[in-house]
Image (tube, rainbow, N blue to C red):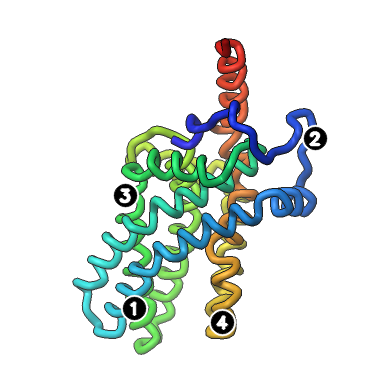
């Protein structure tokens, strides 16, 4: 939905539309220099909203109870998902060099994406919670086959999740259509999908291995660092599939033509 929530009459930070777009590390430095503070604020809101999910899953693991896990997965996922979509919307706007003030666009995107984000949040929350629950108890059983299956499951969730949340932020589409598109995008742009997964696994794996020393870094980098790197990997595929920037260019031209 964020694709159609913009206002080109409102002044704000941006780049010249005629400037050639940088690539790789230079592009990363460009968007960081321009929008890092916006990324941090959106990511911090997402991190705070994920605490009910984390606490609920931790309680379920500590008590070996499945009911709290299901509640934490559904409710915690639904609580966190709108803020995660807000982070995705913030980063996607930066990647397409859209001007505007962050808080104004974030609020509009959050309101537009609130309901569409609930179903993906609930499903994703339950799946991630179950993976964490089984993985924790697997340590006691030392079952290699189940461990490999869990690892593949987590990788699939991360890979599909980056497309699901991006679509919620970009499109007005039902959950079934979003999931179908996510699977197709996952396979169609597999190298980019895998690169996005690698960034996420590297970030969260390092945070887990260095815990608790990594906690200050997680607060500062929260969700925005892995999300930015992941979206930079998959955004060309998203733009090619949905003609994001072409549609925005046409809508901008229509707005300028209809301006009194």
Question: What residue appears at the point 59 percent right and 55 percent down from the top-left corner?
Answer: 39
Secondary structure at numbered mark 1: helix
Residue assigned mark 1: 58
Count residues near mark 3 (Cα–Cα under 10 Å), then give few for <14, some for 14-19, many for 20+: many
Residue assigned mark 2: 20
Residue assigned mark 3: 118
The reply to whether discs 4 and 1 touch (Cβ–Cβ < 8 Å) is no
Count residues near mark 4 (Cα–Cα under 10 Å), then give few for <14, some for 14-19, many for 20+: few
Quadrant of the frame with the C terminus: top right
**Residue 31 screen position, x and y as percent:** 70, 49
Quadrant of the frame with the N terminus: top left
Horizontal side of 144 relative to 100 (left or right) equals: left
Q: CA distance from mark 3 to mark 4?
A: 31 Å
The reply to whether discs 1 and 2 touch (Cβ–Cβ < 8 Å) is no
N-terminal-most mark, 4 or 1:
1
**Residue 82 screen position, x and y as percent:** 39, 51
N-terminal-most mark, 1 or 2:
2
**Residue 67 screen position, x and y as percent:** 19, 71
Q: CA distance from mark 1 to mark 2?
A: 47 Å
Q: On screen, 119 above or below 215?
A: above
Question: What residue appears at the point 40 percent right and 65 percent down from the top-left corner?
Answer: 50
Residue lying furthest bottom in this view?
A: 140
Residue assigned mark 4: 209
Q: On screen, 227 above or below 99?
A: below
N-terminal-most mark, 4 or 2:
2
């Amino acid at each position: 939905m964020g694709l159609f929530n913009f206002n080109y009459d409102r002044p704000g930070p941006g780049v010249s539309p005629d400037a050639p777009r940088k690539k790789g590390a230079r592009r990363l430095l460009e968007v960081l220099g321009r929008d890092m503070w916006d990324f941090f604020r959106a990511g911090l809101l997402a991190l705070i909203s994920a605490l009910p999910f984390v606490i609920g899953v931790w309680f379920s693991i500590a008590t070996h109870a499945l009911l709290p896990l299901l509640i934490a997965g559904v409710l915690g996922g639904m609580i966190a998902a709108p803020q995660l979509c807000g982070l995705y919307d913030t980063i996607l706007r930066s990647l397409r060099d859209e001007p505007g003030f962050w808080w104004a666009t974030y609020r509009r995107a959050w309101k537009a994406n609130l309901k569409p984000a609930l179903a993906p949040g609930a499903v994703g929350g339950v799946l991630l919670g179950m993976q964490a629950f089984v993985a924790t108890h697997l340590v006691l059983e030392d079952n290699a086959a189940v461990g490999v299956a869990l690892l593949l499951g987590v990788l699939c969730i991360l890979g599909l999740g980056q497309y699901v949340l991006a679509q919620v932020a970009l499109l007005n589409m039902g959950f079934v259509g979003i999931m179908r598109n996510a699977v197709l995008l996952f396979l169609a742009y597999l190298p980019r999908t895998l690169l996005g997964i690698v960034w996420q696994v590297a970030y969260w794996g390092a945070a887990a291995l260095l815990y608790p020393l990594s906690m200050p870094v997680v607060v500062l980098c929260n969700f925005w660092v892995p999300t930015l790197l992941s979206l930079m990997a998959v955004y060309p595929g998203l733009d090619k599939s949905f003609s994001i920037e072409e549609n925005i260019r046409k809508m901008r031209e229509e707005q300028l033509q209809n301006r009194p």
